[in-house]
Amino acid sequence: MEALIPVINKLQDVFNTVGADIIQLPQIAVVGTQSSGKSSVLEALVGRDLLPRGTGVVTRRPLILQLVHVDPEDRRKTSEENGVDGEEWGKFLHTKNKIYTDFDEIRLEIEAETERVSGNNKGITDEPIHLKIFSPHVVNLTLVDLPGITKVPVGDQPKDIEVQIKDLIVKHISNPNSIILAVTAANTDMATSEALKVAREVDPDGRRTLAVVTKLDLMDAGTDAMDVLMGRVIPVKLGLIGVVNRSQLDINNKKTVADAIRDEYAFLQKKYPSLASRNGTKYLARTLNRLLMHHIRDCLPELKTRINVLAAQYQSLLSSYGEPVEDQSSTLLQLITKFAAEYCHTIEGTAKYIETTELCGGARICYIFHETFGRTLESVDPLGGLTTIDVLTAIRNATGPRPALFVPEVSFELLVKRQVKRLEEPSLRCVELVHEEMQRIIQHCSNYSTQELLRFPKLHDAIVEVVTSLLRKRLPVTNEMVHNLVAIELAYINTKHPDFADACGLMNNNIEEQRRNRMRELPSSVPRDKTAGGGSQGDQDVGTGNWRGMLKKGEEGVGGDKSMLQTSNPGSPQRGHAVNLLDVPVPVSRKLSAREQRDCEVIERLIKSYFLIVRKNIQDSVPKAVMHFLVNHVKDSLQSELVGQLYKAGLLDDLLTESEDMAQRRNEAADMLKALQKASQVIAEIRETHLW
């Protein structure tokens, strides 16, 4: 069991070499207010004067103090190896292998190192000082001396010094593998102890807290600490131990720690004879040693698991950084090939890393085609932006100066082209969206699929530039093709299209049925043959399914009703007023005649029917054009484009230059992995020697 503490010290040394605190090792954190006697307790445990003293905040950096018990034989061997003249010596982590045998020198080095990092304005920092003390007079312990709790800033101290100190203390004592040594002076009220208060915040059950009551000899006359030491005032699970510190006068008079311990023993025997064996500095040292050993034994299983998990993580991290480049040509070709393959796999949906939070790659392109583009086309109203007046005006303009016997075909073509033209904008927007997604795939591959590219930022930028340039070149070609698809539909209005002919035939039947209904409603005095107007030729035209015949038949059906064509003209001159024949009538809101309503309705139905046919064609042909001219072309030519642009002897050195911090991060990860593996071996040795 005694050998467990040196094992922890060895683990601490392992992690100190890499300057990491990712593993929370078992240790004893010393907490107390200023002038509570913390430093005196630590010096009593060491047996030598080595800590800075003074007024205000003296401890301004955590001091990790490792006490290493050295047997006489080991001491002689170590002295010969290191050239140490003396039975006690110290070593700082920051001074490497320098040996200190003068403890006054150790104190001065602590002061100098504190001011070097924390400055000379009494500020604090959480960067610790590591000090090892080797002595035959100490027990194996690892202690952390923390700044004393204060309330009011003094001198140049920051205004929030109280908060800074408390945060620093809580950071260390929150470590579940630490034991809290709460130091409180006996001449103060234990119920107001700041050390016990902050300890309870992180250890409410008191399972990790040991209380030390200092300055037993300074209590008021007629009082004693019997109730406190018996745990009747503030119960602490790990116990309360009373000690007697050296006074400032003793320190000034160079009273040794050994003499102080003897005087302490005499005081306890005289003042607290029944409790003398369970109090005092020596009992405190043994108790701390025992508690720390048991605590280490309890923490080792979790510690072993934590070390193994971290080792696996750093092994993976080191693998992601890759090995140093030896064959530049081969490495460059591999990276280019891998990027091109991952880019194509992302489009095809076979990528190794699949997004789970949003659509990406080919899936998003599919969504653009069938959801975004498809719904946009379906939302386009076949008659949107087209009013009845527009239709009527087009019909009139197409007839010229002659009154028309039937609706001119030119008006239909003019209006339907105007509507079909509206499909071009959403089609070009579809191309733009697919182009943007192809651009996003570049970043996706960089982030998830080819992390090796992060090692070479210049190569990454060059690949992005080449792919972006390729996409940029294909964009106008694809836009031109989509523009031509709409232009093709505008170039020839195919009124013989099978779907359009069927629609015309259906409308012919509807209009014929309406004509017959009107004929039945006519007065019996009106000759039906004259109303019908046409002969067998008209019936033949209707039966052919020709929309021109349908219109002609419709005109004849209403031609006999003269009153239906008479409309009031608001621009008609009244009697007695001059008439200006140059005035052009402006269309105003009025009730349309039956013929006008019929003509507009027929044209609108024909426009809608033909528009739906064209929209269906565009909805099918635009995605095909985008796939052929943009997506598939980029997939097929990506690797050859990258090789042609980047695989050049003159660019190898520049493209394969690692980022400035990559080599440093690789070395740090390798050092950390080495330290973790060594720590794992240390713990394995504990099992083999049955210490655990």
Image (cartoon, grey):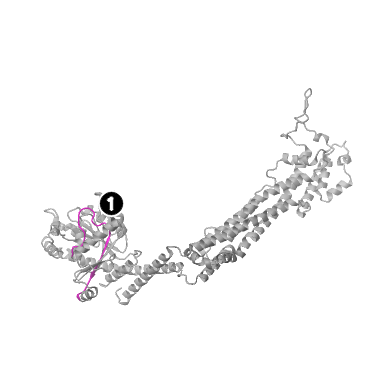
In this view, 403 is above or below 235: above
Q: Residue 449 location, x and y as percent?
A: 52, 64
Asked if residue 496 shows in the view, the reply is yes
Rendered residue at 54%/60% (across/down): 464
Question: Mark 1 Cα within 10 Å, few/some/many (few <14, many 20+)?
Answer: some
Q: Does the stretch in magenta take in 28?
A: no
**Looking at the image, which residue sits at the far front?**
650
Q: In this view, does 463 lie above or below 558?
A: below
The residue closer to the viewer here, 196 or 260, is 260
Instruction: Please tell me which residue lies in front, 325 or 471.
Output: 325
Q: Is the magenta stretch mostly helix, strand or loop?
A: loop
Q: Quadrant of the C terminus?
A: bottom left
For this view, does 156 lie left or right of residue 384? left
Residue 263 x/y as whole percent: 12, 63
Image label count: 1
**Residue type beneath disc 1:** Glu
User: Quadrant of residue 522 in the image?
Assistant: top right
272 sits left or right of 648 in the view: left
Q: In which quarter of the image is residue 83?
A: bottom left
Residue lying at the far top of the rendered structure = 576
Residue 30 seen in the current view: no
Reply above or below: 253 against 89: above
Residue at point 17%, 63% (across, down): 280
Taking the spot 30% from the left edge, 76% from the top edge, the residue there is 690
In the image, 423 versus 193, the foreground residue is 423
Between 334 and 427, the one lying in front of the other is 334
Q: In this view, does 95 lie above or below 621?
A: below
Q: Where is residue 665 in the image (x, y as percent from the top left)?
A: 41, 65
Question: Where's the N terminus, which quadrant?
Answer: bottom left
Q: Determine which residue is flagged by label 1.
A: 162
Q: Magenta segment, which residues?
A: 48-72
